[in-house]
């Protein structure tokens, strides 16, 4: 018996060392200089959507690193900042967003590195860092609501935000200093941004800074990303094999559901990778809680509710996966606003997170747990329908049911 225990311990140590070595580059990413030069600004424009047809039948097994490689082959590393601009608009329910970066070779200039909801020609614009709106954005040391631009001809930066009635900005930092700003705006004069909105803006700005840190050689970086995704998946398999198997189920369900809902190629691959990693935050949950053969206590449930945030922190440490981390962070939000961690509601929850919430619940209900038996597929679908409009997005429930409904045997 002792020999078996020693063998298991040895295997665990080897896997832990492997995971540490693979994850170490991500842990250092925040201290390196940014990987994005200002010359790359034009590369950040979004690639036109490529329609994806639903894939019939059960998918062939796909290794975690292969999913990461498939995403990166789309040129995703050049789209990360655009994706973050998309997500910050969704999370805050606003129309416009911009990522502004100082040109390190021209300290008195700022480049519009990404923009959403405004003239796409703005991407690549070079503007004076001072004065006016641009100066206010770059001087802000924390998320701040700004007065609306007055359109003065002496304020070239106001041309970026023409017509905006409300603006907010958060600093984008890396290598220990502020190098730019993530800004949002709306034409709605009645819109108010509260403390929680500014916190969300600050969180996405931090992800923007992390996305800018890394290596300039994207080919080398792609290999690093794939290896780190593999390491996270392997670590979860060792820590809790059932959770890892559940993640594979959610990937397959999310892929089919997302395709039926018309997600484009980049969105679909991003969703698959987020589904694969959505539970990696459980690496920080004690094993005795994960495998407890009874319902969790209130304190244990509170602990478990941290796993989306912990998962997002781990995923955001993988170079280029900052937008994927946002999907992971919000996969336990509810459309009625009573979910966690952000209490977001309706369309302010990223659609990929809404898809994951439904697929995660269906997969969990149809799998056995230490404290209960699995439900039959038609029983799980009935529960999803009952909770559609409160916990789940009805459109996602309908799409999932259309995918799995034909395979479900209704009771006699």
Image (cartoon, grey):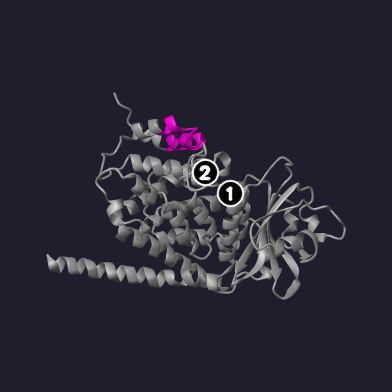
For numbered disc 2, what is the local secondary structure? loop
- Using the image, tell me which numbered label, if any, was put on residue 196: 1
Residue 103 visible in the shown view: yes
The foreground one among 261 and 4 is: 4
Image point (83%, 52%), residue name: 150
x then y, percent, for residue 49: 60, 50
| Residue 10 image position (x, y, % from top left) | 24, 70
Which residue ends up furthest to the left in the rendered image?
1
Residue for point 76% across, 48% down: 164
Task: Look at the image and tell me in which quarter the N terminus lies.
Answer: bottom left
Q: Main secondary structure of the magenta part?
A: helix
User: Magenta stretch containing residue 161, yes or no?
Assistant: no
In the image, residue 305 above or below residue 71: above
**CB within 8 Å, label 1 to label 2:** yes
Percent x, y of residue 378: 35, 32
Q: Is residue 54 visible?
A: no
Q: Nearer the viewer, residue 121 or 301?
A: 301
Is residue 22 rendered to the left or right of residue 3? Answer: right
Along the line of sight, the residue nearer the viewer: 374 or 314: 314
**Number of callouts:** 2
Characterize the local packing of mark 1: few (<14), some (14-19) or many (20 or more) Cα atoms within 10 angstroms.
Answer: few
- Secondary-structure class at tag 1: helix
Instruction: Give the mark nearer the N terminus: 1 vs 2.
Output: 1
401 magenta-colored = yes
Question: Where is residue 47, by image quadrant?
Answer: bottom right
Residue carrying label 2: 343
Question: Which quarter of the rendering shows the C terminus?
Answer: top left
- In terms of image quadrants, where is residue 62? bottom left
Boundaries of the magenta span: 384-403
The dot on residue 333 is: none
**Residue at screen point 63% across, 57% down:** 82
């Amino acid at each position: 018996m002792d020999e078996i225990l020693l063998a298991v311990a040895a295997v665990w140590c080897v896997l832990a060392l492997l995971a540490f070595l693979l994850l170490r580059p991500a842990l250092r990413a925040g201290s390196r200089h940014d990987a994005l030069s200002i010359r790359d600004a034009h590369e950040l424009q979004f690639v036109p959507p490529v329609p994806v047809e639903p894939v019939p039948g059960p998918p062939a097994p796909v290794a975690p690193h292969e999913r990461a490689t498939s995403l990166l082959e789309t040129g995703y590393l050049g789209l990360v900042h655009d994706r973050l601009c998309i997500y910050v608009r969704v999370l805050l329910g606003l129309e416009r967003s911009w990522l502004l970066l100082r040109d390190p070779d021209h300290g008195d200039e700022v480049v519009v590195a990404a923009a959403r909801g405004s003239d796409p020609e703005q991407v690549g614009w070079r503007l004076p860092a001072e004065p006016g709106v641009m100066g206010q954005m770059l001087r802000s040391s924390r998320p701040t609501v700004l007065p609306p631009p007055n359109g003065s001809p002496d304020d070239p930066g106001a041309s970026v935000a023409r017509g905006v009635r409300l603006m907010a900005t958060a600093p984008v930092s890396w290598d220990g200093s502020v190098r730019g700003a993530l800004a949002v705006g709306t034409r709605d004069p009645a819109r108010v941004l509260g403390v929680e909105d500014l916190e969300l803006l600050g969180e996405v700005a931090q992800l923007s800074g992390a996305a800018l840190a890394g290596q300039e050689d994207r080919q080398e970086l792609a290999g690093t990303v794939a290896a780190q995704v593999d390491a996270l998946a392997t670590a979860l398999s060792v820590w809790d094999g059932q959770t890892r198997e559940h993640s594979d189920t959610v990937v397959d369900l999310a892929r089919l559901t997302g395709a039926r809902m018309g997600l484009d190629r980049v969105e679909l691959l991003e969703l698959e990778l987020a589904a694969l990693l959505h539970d990696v935050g459980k690496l920080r949950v004690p094993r005795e809680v994960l495998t407890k053969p009874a319902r969790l206590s209130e304190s244990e449930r509170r602990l478990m509710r941290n796993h989306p945030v912990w998962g997002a922190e781990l995923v955001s440490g993988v170079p280029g996966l900052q937008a994927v981390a946002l999907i992971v962070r919000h996969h336990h939000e509810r459309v009625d606003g009573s979910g966690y961690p952000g209490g977001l509601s309706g369309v302010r929850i990223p659609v990929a997170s809404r898809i994951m919430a439904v697929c995660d619940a269906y997969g969990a209900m149809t799998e056995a747990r230490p404290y209960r038996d699995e439900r039959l597929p038609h029983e799980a679908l009935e529960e999803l329908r009952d909770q559609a409009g409160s916990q789940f997005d009805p459109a996602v429930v309908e799409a999932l049911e259309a995918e799995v409904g034909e395979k479900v045997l209704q009771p006699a």
